[in-house]
């Protein structure tokens, strides 16, 4: 398999509003990120994925862009952005921008023109439909309610799959695509190294046929983008593709397809919701199902594409609270979950705070929450008569604000995030859980992540090794091997708080077994000696022939 510069890399996602505030206004900013680059260098990451910092009225925290060529004043200036790129480069850290081209803000110049009249040159930059009898179709917005908004000015509806302040662009218009490619070239020329592409599987949608994801032109547009922009730079790209399957991921990421480097799968992220009822309908995770999904992605893309590996991002709850144990075994379960993911084939993504084991937030009422999706869901369910405590349980478990509370730097006021009043309350456990404490303790989650990142750079088996699931039906243990050349990597993990016994399905010659990482002291030296696993215990063996 062809080796590229980013395959040994680890990516760290920064949600700027919540990372570090340098000027005391309660909002994280670009200078705040610059102040913490040494921290990221110590961790060992190679690439920062920066959530949107473009000019935005912030209806959806920056994913509603009003100007692609300006920085949101709350975050700083273009000069700050240039300094960030430059300072990161000095530490061999690349910057990956968030690319939001499915929609803009309704305050973008293009949309302000588009809504002026039906014959305005920008009219066709967006999706407009006339209709005598209410909305042109029954398509619903992801953020609740109809995806059609009536616009008084020209007496037509415009389409918005997200907030009504996020009208969808019409990428079937070649002029729109050209304008977007010009903008992408602008940022790559400025020194960023690539893009995380927001809901990119929507850009080929055929609204009148009610085809939203994977439209017939989607892959044509991605190849055109690659030809016009990406192929001219040594870029890294990852597409957010909620609809992707292992089969369609091969189309996006296949070596000769000239589209994207990776996509984000959502299949593992929906395993703790009741099928067909959406993310708020809670159910317990079934480990056997999780193993099946992760394994299918590992085997389907082997030598045909490339996986992205993630548990957390700005849209997901904290993994240690979700599938670990954020109380008694927070340390052990955070390390176990990291190990299971980082030993797989693909490029790992770490979300800010994951490396110190930050947890979900438990606000007692809706007034503390800031996320538009969460607030809309609360009011919609309340109007349907669902008991408030039931709604709040779903929000505390799955709400996006779990990931968006400010980063916990130390045990000072507001966790050292700001000297002012933070835009959202800091999790009260910042006294015990913070970066300063983590860096003082060589056995911390932070240094465990540092080791995992270093192993990926050192061991080629992590890049090339073929994956095989072991103990597929075991309800508590996740185990798999990676095999390459004369080496076998064996990963064993107890996913829960019990003491299951490990019976490996094959006898290995483990006389040359070396433990390369584990989350407890005194682990079993050889796989053949494994007996009971301790709660959330994980061990990785490298076995040489």
Image: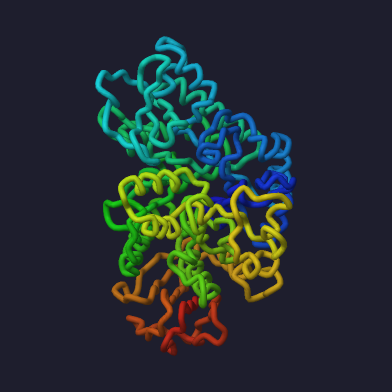
188 relative to 506 in the view: left or right: right
Residue at x 34% of width, y 66% of height: 284
Residue 131, position as x, y percentages in the image: 28, 20
Residue 194 found in image quarter? top right
Number of callouts? 0
Q: Tell which of 475 and 60 is nearer to you.
A: 60
203 relative to 342 in the view: left or right: left
Residue 110, position as x, y percentages in the image: 51, 21
Residue 82, position as x, y percentages in the image: 71, 38
Quadrant for the N terminus, please: bottom left
72 relative to 530 in the view: left or right: right
What's the image's color scheme? rainbow
Q: Tell which of 98 and 325 is nearer to you.
A: 325
- 1 shown above or below 454: above
Residue at x 53% of width, y 32% of height: 229
Q: Tell which of 154 and 367 is nearer to you.
A: 367
Residue at x 48% of width, y 66% of height: 321
Residue furthest out toward the top? 119
Residue 340, position as x, y percentages in the image: 46, 68
From this viewpoint, is residue 92 visible?
A: yes
From this viewpoint, is residue 250 visible?
A: no
Residue at x 70% of width, y 58% of height: 416
């Amino acid at each position: 398999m062809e080796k590229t510069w980013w395959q040994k890399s680890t990516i760290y996602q920064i949600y700027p509003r919540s990372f570090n505030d340098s000027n005391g206004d309660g909002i994280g900013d670009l200078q705040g990120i610059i102040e913490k680059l040494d921290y990221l260098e110590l961790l060992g990451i190679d690439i920062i994925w920066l959530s949107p910092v473009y000019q935005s009225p912030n209806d959806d925290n920056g994913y509603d862009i009003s100007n692609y060529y300006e920085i949101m004043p709350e975050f700083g200036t273009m000069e700050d952005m240039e300094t960030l790129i430059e300072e990161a480069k000095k530490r061999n850290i690349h910057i990956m921008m968030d690319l939001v081209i499915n929609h803009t803000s309704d305050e973008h110049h293009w949309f302000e023109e588009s809504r002026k009249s039906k014959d305005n040159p920008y009219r066709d930059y967006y999706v407009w439909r006339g209709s005598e009898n209410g909305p042109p179709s029954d398509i619903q917005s992801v953020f609740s309610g109809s995806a059609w908004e009536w616009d008084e000015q020209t007496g037509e509806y415009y389409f918005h799959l997200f907030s009504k302040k996020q009208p969808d662009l019409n990428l079937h218009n070649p002029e729109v695509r050209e304008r977007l490619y010009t903008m992408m070239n602008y940022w790559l020329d400025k020194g960023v190294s690539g893009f995380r592409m927001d809901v990119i599987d929507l850009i080929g949608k055929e609204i009148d046929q009610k085809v939203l994801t994977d439209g017939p032109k989607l892959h044509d547009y991605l190849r055109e983008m690659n030809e016009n922009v990406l192929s001219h730079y040594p870029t890294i790209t990852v597409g957010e593709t909620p609809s992707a399957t292992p089969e369609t991921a091969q189309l996006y990421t296949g070596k000769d397809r000239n589209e994207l480097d990776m996509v984000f799968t959502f299949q593992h992220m929906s395993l703790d919701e009741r099928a067909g009822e959406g993310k708020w309908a809670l159910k317990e995770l079934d480990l056997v199902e999780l193993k099946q999904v992760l394994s299918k992605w590992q085997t389907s893309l082997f030598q045909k594409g490339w996986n992205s590996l993630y548990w957390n991002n700005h849209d997901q709850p904290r993994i240690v609270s979700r599938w670990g144990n954020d109380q008694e075994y927070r340390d052990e379960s955070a390390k176990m979950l990291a190990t299971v993911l980082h030993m797989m084939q693909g490029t790992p993504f770490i979300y800010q705070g994951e490396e110190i084991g930050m947890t979900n937030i438990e606000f007692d009422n809706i007034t503390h929450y800031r996320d538009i999706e969460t607030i809309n869901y609360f009011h919609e369910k309340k109007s349907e008569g669902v008991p408030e405590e039931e709604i709040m349980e779903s929000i505390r478990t799955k709400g996006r604000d779990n990931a968006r509370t400010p980063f916990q730097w130390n045990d000072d006021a507001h966790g050292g995030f700001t000297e002012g009043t933070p835009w959202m309350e800091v999790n009260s456990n910042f006294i015990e859980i913070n970066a300063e404490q983590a860096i003082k303790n060589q056995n911390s989650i932070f240094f465990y992540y540092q080791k995992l990142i270093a192993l990926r750079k050192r061991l080629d088996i992590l890049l090339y090794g073929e994956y095989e699931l072991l103990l597929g039906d075991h309800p508590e243990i996740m185990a798999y091997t990676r095999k390459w050349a004369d080496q076998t990597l064996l990963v064993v993990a107890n996913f829960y708080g019990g003491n299951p016994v490990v019976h490996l399905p094959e006898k290995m010659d483990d006389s040359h077994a070396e433990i390369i990482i584990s989350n407890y002291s005194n682990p079993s030296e050889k796989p053949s000696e494994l007996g009971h696993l301790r709660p959330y215990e994980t061990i990785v063996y490298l076995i040489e022939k």
